[in-house]
Amino acid sequence: MESLIRKYDRPVPRYTSFPTAVQFTESPTWSEHRSLITELNRSEPASIYIHVPFCHSLCHYCGCHTKIVSRYEPVKEYISSLLEEISIFRSTLCDRIPASRIHFGGGSPNFTEIEDLRKILEALRETFSFSHETEIDMECDPRLLTEEKINALSKLDINRISLGVQDFDKNVQEAINRVQPYELVEKCVYQLRERGISHVNFDLMTGLPLQTLETLERTLDLTLSLCPDRIAIFSYAHVPWMKKHQLLLEKYPRPDLLTRFEMAERASSYLQNNDYIAIGFDHFALKNDSLAIAQETGKLHRNFQGYTDDGAKTLIGFGLSAISQYENAYTQNTTDPTAYRQALKERRLPSARSCHLKEEDKIRRSLIERIMCDFRVNLSDFPQIPVPCENLSPLLSDGLASFDDSRKVLLVTERGRPFVRLVAACFDPYLEQVENRHARAI
Ligand code: SF4
């Protein structure tokens, strides 16, 4: 295995979209963007993403689009812009369309004061129709989750919280500048459940400074003691040329390539031996969780938030840097706060980049999603796409992928699961042009 790990250690997209975000180039005109909205099918549900790019303290591994603030005023101003953006979308759309899910991501969305969260949800309810099936979930920093806040979140009908945990080891937490003892997370989990927010997810990380197989095992033990519904284990992407603050981590030893691989493997077997079902290549869920059921029934999807049971084909993102997905295009909002406010002042949506999908892109998008979700794809469902024999050949000979007897179904083997992104990449004709802009495959 060691030689395979070294051989395939290369930058590959995570395929949360296809084409991937590095392909977004042209800036759409307002009239093009407006057409994407007016052409939306009013009866098809959309998934809504709200980006809150503020945190109270910088985690030194952070790869997100966020800003560190010590006062609430900048957040307040941002929320009023966000409400303006939702209102422009509403006046463009005219009718309401069903919302399948509302996801608050960041940053630390729970930095937002409850009154402002209420205003956002009210604006969304005026723009989209909610039903009892509309799930509202939020990424939360446990350090900002007081009992009072948890109580108020439950009254806003938030029904799933993802806690950023990363690692419970004190030394690792100090190295990454994110100290949050186990007792703090434990208290949050109990209070969330007590207040009726029964769905709790944990985000963990491997590859962090000072992390070892022993610290990871201890973190997993402590995680199991709190029994989260879902666990995502992300591999730390060290990209200091893009995120300069990550240089602060270079004074600490970090697990090498083989140890990182071993960490992911051990975490996977450990969780699967303790009642969790592996979902895709980096998520785990309890058997009765909707994500596990979606996988079991072939209804697992992948979008910008990772693996999901949300089948909405349209994703509408609000806020700085947020991405929207339409049938024929992606658009991405500007990351520049001044340009963001200026666009809103001119009563247009603040998109700065976009990508128009050709018919072939849409077919490849479905094909790649099936590989990433199911670890298999029936290529006869995609007759328009030539089989990339040359790209697949090394993966086939190394036993990471195989064909069934009919030679129509491409399978990612058990051994090849950690390398699934490389199998998907065989079908990505854009990959070569942007090779240095993705995190490593392992
Ligand atoms: S809480 Fe999340 S978004 Fe904020 S600095 Fe830490 S890693 Fe980045």
Image: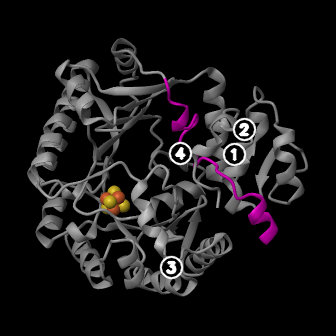
249 vs 243: above or below: below
Quarter the N terminus occupies: bottom right
Closer to the camera in the image, 397 or 103: 397
Task: Please report the bounds of the magenta region as a residue range.
Answer: 1-25
Q: Earlier in the sequence, mark 3 or mark 4?
A: 4
Closer to the camera in the image, 158 or 388: 388
Q: Return the x and y of residue 75 as percentages of the image width and height.
A: 16, 48
Q: Residue furthest top?
A: 31
Q: Secondary structure at mark 1?
A: helix
Mark 3 vs mark 4, CA separation in Å: 27 Å
Q: Quickly name the residue at label 4.
A: 16
Q: Quickly name the residue at label 1.
A: 424
Q: Earlier in the sequence, mark 4 or mark 2?
A: 4
Q: Earlier in the sequence, mark 3 or mark 2?
A: 3
Q: For residue 169, say whether it is visible.
A: no
Q: Quickly name the residue at label 3.
A: 211
Q: Return the x and y of residue 308 as percentages of the image width and height.
A: 48, 51
Q: Quickly name the residue at label 2.
A: 427
Q: What secondary structure is the stretch in magenta mostly built from?
A: loop
Residue at point 65%, 30% (across, down) = 363
Q: Return the x and y of residue 186 as percentages of the image width and height.
A: 29, 81
Indicate the amino acid at tag 4: Thr
Quarter the C terminus occupies: bottom right
Residue contact at pointers 2 and 1, CB within 8 angstroms: yes
Q: Nearer the viewer, mark 3 or mark 4?
A: 3
Q: Return the x and y of residue 214 as percentages of the image width and height.
A: 54, 87
